[in-house]
């Protein structure tokens, strides 16, 4: 198969979909790999390293989209890339369609085979291609939140760990999955007082266990959310209903309960955000204020630590990519339920129920269209 990887054009996105080691793995199995010049620069991989691994370098993204059967990326295609996507082309990347109707329609109109990293789901319900980015975003969320709590950055002027004789900062985490658990780990490490809320009691029990009770756990009810956000300095939004738009757990009227210049880091922004006042921001202008609350809503947080992120992401996407390249998307989906659950669009049909529900569009089960 001809496989292509383009330079990411989303603002401040420095990750890349394939490392030279990935190129070598595809080439070893007889595939041809095309890399756009400079694609790996942001993550620290030179064109020469890609060449040495067996890739052919092309200058223009148009040439890669024009000649490759499968495109491996990191972020969803940007509007300027929509016209380049071709019928039957496999797009293997993060798509986050439930938060993006325009892109959903573009993939359907262009009859792209869209396989989304974030909905590849193993039989045990875990999301192997989302997990490494969630680990990174979870850890970064506290690092960024701590920074924006500093007064010069617009925050309350709170040091999360406090000092002897002065109260520690309070962190509330909504959602105790991968993002939430990693946020809790870093917040605890910084010395903050941490409360985590989830709707799954099994998850709350797990958190209680692994942190030996150092993290307070609460059921995620409206009453508990109201109480906890009113006391917190930093609130992390980390909920997910796979494939669907995030539920709005913090509505605008809740902001008035919160302390002035406290910080919300809504990591779930890529699924529409779990705070009503969330709107996506970028690394060069990451925060804005609503009703006295600082909002940090960067949709591609791991892009800031591009090298760590690229290595973590590509090591989990590679085996799935190799299977798709070897068998073709249809057989790969038939053989591997995880890849099948990753299929969002195929031959102009929507194959992800949650995306269909977000925009009231018709959908068909992946198994039926293949
Ligand atoms: N902004 C970024 O750069 C970035 C990076 C990585 C992940 N993310 C996003 O972060 C979000 C979380 O990802 P994850 O990997 O931790 O997902 P996950 O599935 O591991 O965890 C989500 C958790 O949310 C819980 N949840 C669902 N509804 C809830 C509710 N009403 N109240 C409280 N908890 C609820 C679930 O029970 C689950 O434990 C996703 O939207 C993901 O796309 C964003």
Image: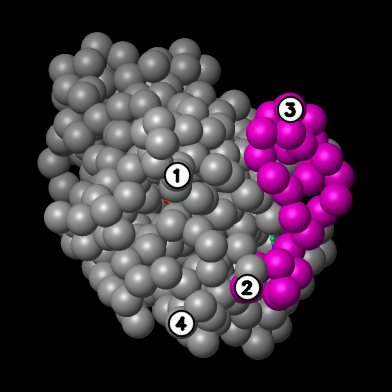
Q: Which quadrant is home to the C terminus?
A: bottom right
Q: Quadrant of ligand 1?
A: bottom right
Give the alpha-carbon distance from disc 1 to disc 4, as whole Å. Answer: 23 Å
Disc 3, disc 2: CB below 8 Å? no
Q: Which residue is mark 3?
A: 212
Q: Position of residue 227 (x, y in %)?
A: 64, 69
Q: Which residue, as the protein is rendered here, is positioned at the far front?
A: 165
Q: Which residue is mark 4?
A: 256
Give the class, few, some or many, for how many residues have Cα within 10 Å of label 3's Cα (few <14, many ≥20).
Answer: few
Give the class, few, some or many, for how many residues have Cα within 10 Å of label 1's Cα (few <14, many ≥20).
Answer: some
Give the alpha-carbon distance from disc 4 to disc 2, as whole Å. Answer: 10 Å
Q: Which residue is mark 1?
A: 167
Is residue 215 within the magenta segment? yes
Horizontally, residue 286 falls left or right of residue 82, namely: left
Is label 2 in a helix, a strand or a loop? helix
Mark seen at residue 226 = 2
Give the alpha-carbon distance from disc 3 to disc 2, as whole Å. Answer: 25 Å
Q: Position of residue 129 (x, y in %)?
A: 57, 39
Give the alpha-carbon distance from disc 3 to disc 4, as whole Å. Answer: 33 Å
């Amino acid at each position: 198969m001809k496989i292509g990887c383009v330079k990411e054009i989303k603002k401040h996105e420095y990750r890349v979909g394939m490392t030279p080691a990935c190129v070598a793995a595809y080439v070893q199995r007889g595939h041809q790999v095309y890399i756009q010049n400079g694609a790996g620069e942001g993550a620290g991989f030179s064109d020469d390293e890609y060449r040495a691994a067996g890739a052919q370098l092309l200058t223009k993204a148009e040439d890669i989209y024009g000649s490759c059967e499968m495109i491996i990326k990191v972020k969803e295609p940007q509007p300027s890339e929509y016209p380049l996507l071709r019928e039957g082309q496999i797009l293997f990347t993060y798509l986050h369609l439930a938060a993006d109707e325009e892109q959903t329609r573009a993939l359907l109109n262009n009859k792209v085979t869209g396989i989304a990293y974030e909905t590849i789901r193993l039989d045990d319900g875990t999301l192997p291609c989302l997990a490494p980015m969630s680990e990174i975003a979870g850890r970064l969320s506290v690092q960024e939140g701590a920074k924006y709590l500093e007064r010069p950055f617009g925050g309350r002027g709170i040091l999360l760990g406090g000092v002897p004789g002065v109260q520690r900062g309070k962190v509330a985490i909504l959602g105790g999955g991968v993002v939430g658990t990693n946020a809790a780990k870093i917040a605890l490490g910084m010395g903050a007082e941490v409360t985590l809320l989830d709707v799954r009691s099994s998850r709350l029990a797990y958190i209680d266990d692994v942190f030996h009770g150092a993290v307070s756990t609460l059921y995620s009810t409206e009453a508990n959310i109201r109480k906890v956000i009113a006391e917190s300095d930093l609130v992390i939004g980390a909920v997910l209903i796979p494939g669907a738009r995030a539920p709005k757990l913090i509505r605008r009227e809740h902001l008035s309960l919160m302390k002035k210049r406290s910080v919300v880091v809504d990591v779930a922004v890529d699924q529409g955000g779990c705070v009503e006042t969330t709107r996506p921001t970028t690394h060069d202008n990451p925060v804005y204020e609503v009703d006295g609350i600082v909002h940090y809503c960067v949709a591609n947080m791991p892009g800031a630590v591009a090298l760590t992120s690229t290595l973590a992401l590509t090591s989990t996407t590679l085996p799935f990519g190799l299977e798709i390249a070897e068998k073709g998307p249809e057989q790969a989906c038939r053989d591997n339920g995880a890849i099948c659950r990753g299929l969002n669009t195929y031959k102009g049909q929507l194959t992800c129920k949650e995306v269909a529900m977000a925009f009231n569009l018709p959908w068909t089960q992946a198994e039926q269209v293949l």
